[in-house]
Image (spheres, rainbow, N blue to C red):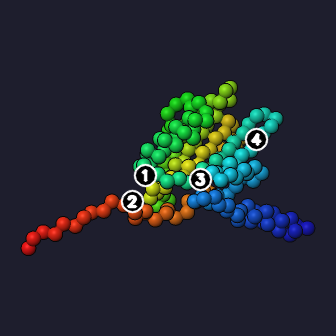
Amino acid sequence: MKHLLLFIMILFLAMGLFAQKQSFDVVNYEMPRGWDKIETENGVQLSTKDDGKGNYAAAVIVRSVASTKLPNDNFSSSWKSLVQGTVKVLEAPTISDMDIENGWTCIIGQANYTDGHIKGLVTLVTATANSKMVNIVLITNTNKYQNELLAFINSVELKEAPPQNIKNKPTINAVKTPN
């Protein structure tokens, strides 16, 4: 009986360690257990809520789009449209150091927000590479889901950055000099 119980515990542990990655557009991720998933052409929303207390958390992966802006400019425009266009942000975002993953330059910013009488924390991850941009928004009104959100964002892997679009790459004309 002891061995059977030990085997079952190891099996559940192994299942947790080898959770299957899911994919949307250029983002691979592990979905938090027990969360709901809504996928559309433009993105994926993963969410959970505690109906009894009104607590919620969501992670939204937005389909990548073409962009010729610099990473900081992509972050600023995404913050305005995806965050400030959704909730009332109480302060400027706290920006973390840039990170580069598989050729993508990532900028992460977060700030407190209000949505009516609800207060919470919103985080935006903007990744830019070779004229392409992808965004992930995390939003919650409680610390209850902090571990799930952290596990989700740590599971995110960006696929290899798309190759540079040669058609839009500036050219240098060679000038021959007389001998």
Labelled pair 2, 1 in contact (Cβ < 8 Å): yes
Instruction: Determine if residue 69 is in view.
Output: yes
Which residue was labeled with disc 4?
49
Question: Is 67 situated left or right of 142 in this image?
Answer: left
Q: Which mark is residue 63?
A: 3
**Looking at the picture, how far across and down is residue 5, in whole percent?**
86, 65
Which residue was labeled with disc 2?
168
Element marked by disc 2: helix
How many angstroms separate mark 2 from mark 1 (CA)? 10 Å
Of pointers 4 and 3, the one earlier in the residue sequence: 4
How many angstroms separate mark 1 from mark 3 (CA)? 16 Å
Amino acid at dot 1: Thr
Of pointers 2 and 1, the one earlier in the residue sequence: 1
* Label 1: few (<14), some (14–19) or many (≥20) C-alpha neighbours in 10 Å: some
Judged by depth in the image, the label closer to the viewer, 4 or 2, is: 2
Observer-nearest of 166 and 111? 166
* Residue occupying image coordinates x 39% and y 59%: 168
Of pointers 4 and 2, the one earlier in the residue sequence: 4
Which residue was labeled with disc 1?
68
